[in-house]
């Protein structure tokens, strides 16, 4: 992902620039960083791994905008007394601990990548972001915004952008972009609630609490339980987040409103966590993590597709998760092709197995359906299909790869569905395709 993922939405950055021209430096800087990143080939941005590198290192930019700045504290070293440095150190360490101890993952890439963070970036800089290589935190403007390292969930949010980049790779626009944003808030909520030892019912579900300075009429930057209610201040305006698919904002701003529409999946996560009960990082958190990393969610997955992946990963909590998504107007279904579509697919029958094969050199489509409960198959074939369907794991929402003239498949297995390339088919799926195309109703 070449695009910088920023913590503050563009509408707030613009408002700040109107209020205080000095804060406009943030806007200029963000645009300059985006432009610089866009000009650099992605391979140059890949983190360099050293076998003996510390798990994390915090750098000090000293008010300049050179990255990464001067290294000031690494894993295993004592506190420096610089509040921003030590907050970044503690926040990154706690985020890595959540990944390792709760999700069994070694850093954001799953292979122990060292985490780099820079504090004191720029002057009166009102943002935090992941630039594809490292975390960056400003000191705030001292008027409305305090340090961006102050709320630990801001740090968790930014590190989760690195996790998403290395797993599902959700593109940063429209519904996939809103999911990318939401997944970062989900990780941030798990981090904050775990550090506070709170259950889903006890938690405040605020993101960025403590970021605003006294005098600002704001509880936080976002409210996952009640999107759109986090702040209402004469200088900032009102929190514009939405929390239901009916209110989805079609806009070209903010990469299609990724920070605004993220309220919809945020609220679904809150509803699931409360319905499941107990501690969020042990209940709904692992379900969302499994969906993000399990292969069913890809770069173009939309709300319905992501919802389906969470339902598929929810086990005994499937109905609670399905109900949570229904509470924000999203029907857990197959992801329609293309980003930004909000039309949920109808829930297919549990006994239905459908294969649609398209593409190939001649470009024709064949489709075949069997109903395992309808008795149209001989007992042996039905039994084999039932066993295969039970054995197949999550299906990807979009093909992982494809080659010219190879077939593409749309496969529906009793309520789950996915899109696969010829090269994505494992032996079980290949056998299912053969059996259904040979024995099913066209
Ligand atoms: Zn973000």
Image: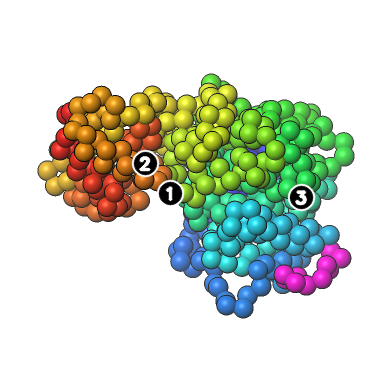
Vertical side of 373 occupied by 51: above or below: below
Residue nearest the observer in this picture, 235 or 86:
86
* Count of number-bearing discs: 3
Tell whether 269 sits left or right of 310. right
- Marks 2 and 1, how far apart at CA: 17 Å
Q: Which residues are magenta?
A: 72-82
Give the labeled residue for mark 3. 195
Eyeballing the image, is 386 above or below 159? above
| SS majority, magenta | loop
Which element carries disc 1, helix, strand or loop?
Answer: loop
Q: Residue at x 56, y 42 (%)?
A: 287
Disc 1 marks which residue?
Answer: 295
401 part of magenta stretch: no
Which residue is label 2 attached to? 390
**Toward which corner of the image does residue 370 lie, by quadrant?**
top left
Identify which residue, 316 or 51, lies in the foreground: 316
Residue in front for this viewpoint, 59 or 288: 288
- Which residue corresponds to the image point at 61% horizontal and 39% vertical from the top-left? 284
Determine whether the residue tagged by mark 3 lies in a helix, strand or loop. helix
Residue shown at the point (50%, 27%) measured from the top left: 330
């Amino acid at each position: 992902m070449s695009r910088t993922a920023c913590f503050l939405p563009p509408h707030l950055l613009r408002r700040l620039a109107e209020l205080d021209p000095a804060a406009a430096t943030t806007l200029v800087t963000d645009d300059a960083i985006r432009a610089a990143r866009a000009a650099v080939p992605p391979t140059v941005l890949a983190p360099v791994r050293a076998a003996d590198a510390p798990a994390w290192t915090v750098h000090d930019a000293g008010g300049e905008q050179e990255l990464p700045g001067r290294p000031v504290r690494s894993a295993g070293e004592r506190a420096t007394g610089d509040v921003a440095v030590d907050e970044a150190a503690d926040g990154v360490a706690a985020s890595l601990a959540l990944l390792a101890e709760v999700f069994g993952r070694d850093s954001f890439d799953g292979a122990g990548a060292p985490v780099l963070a820079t504090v004191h970036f720029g002057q009166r800089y009102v943002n935090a972001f992941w630039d594809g290589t490292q975390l960056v935190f400003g000191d705030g403007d001292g008027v409305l915004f305090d340090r961006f390292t102050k709320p630990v969930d801001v740090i968790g949010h930014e590190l989760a952008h690195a996790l998403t980049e290395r797993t599902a790779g959700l593109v940063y626009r429209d519904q996939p972009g809103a999911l990318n944003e939401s997944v970062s808030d989900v990780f941030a909520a798990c981090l904050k609630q775990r550090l506070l030892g709170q259950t889903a019912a006890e938690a405040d579900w605020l993101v960025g609490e403590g970021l605003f300075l006294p005098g600002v009429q704001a509880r936080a930057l976002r409210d996952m339980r009640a999107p759109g209610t986090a702040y209402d201040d004469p200088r900032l305006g009102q929190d514009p987040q939405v929390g239901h698919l009916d209110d989805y904002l079609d806009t070209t701003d903010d990469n299609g409103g990724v920070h605004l529409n993220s309220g919809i999946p945020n609220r679904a996560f809150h509803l699931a966590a409360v319905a499941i009960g107990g501690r969020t990082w042990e209940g709904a958190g692992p379900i969302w993590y499994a969906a993000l990393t399990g292969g069913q969610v890809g770069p173009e997955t939309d709300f319905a597709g992501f919802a389906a992946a969470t339902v598929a990963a929810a086990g005994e909590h499937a109905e609670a998760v399905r109900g949570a998504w229904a509470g924000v107007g999203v029907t857990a279904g197959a992801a329609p092709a293309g980003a930004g579509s909000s039309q949920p697919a109808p829930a297919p029958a549990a006994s239905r197995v459908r294969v649609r094969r398209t593409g190939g050199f001649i470009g024709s489509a064949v489709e075949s359906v069997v109903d395992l409960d309808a008795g149209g198959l001989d007992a042996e074939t039905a039994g084999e299909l039932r066993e295969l369907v039970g054995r197949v794991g999550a299906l990807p929402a979009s093909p992982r790869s494809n080659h010219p003239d190879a077939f593409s498949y749309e496969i529906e297995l009793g309520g789950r569905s996915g899109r696969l390339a010829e090269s994505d088919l494992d032996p079980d799926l290949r056998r299912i395709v053969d059996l259904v195309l040979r024995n099913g109703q066209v």
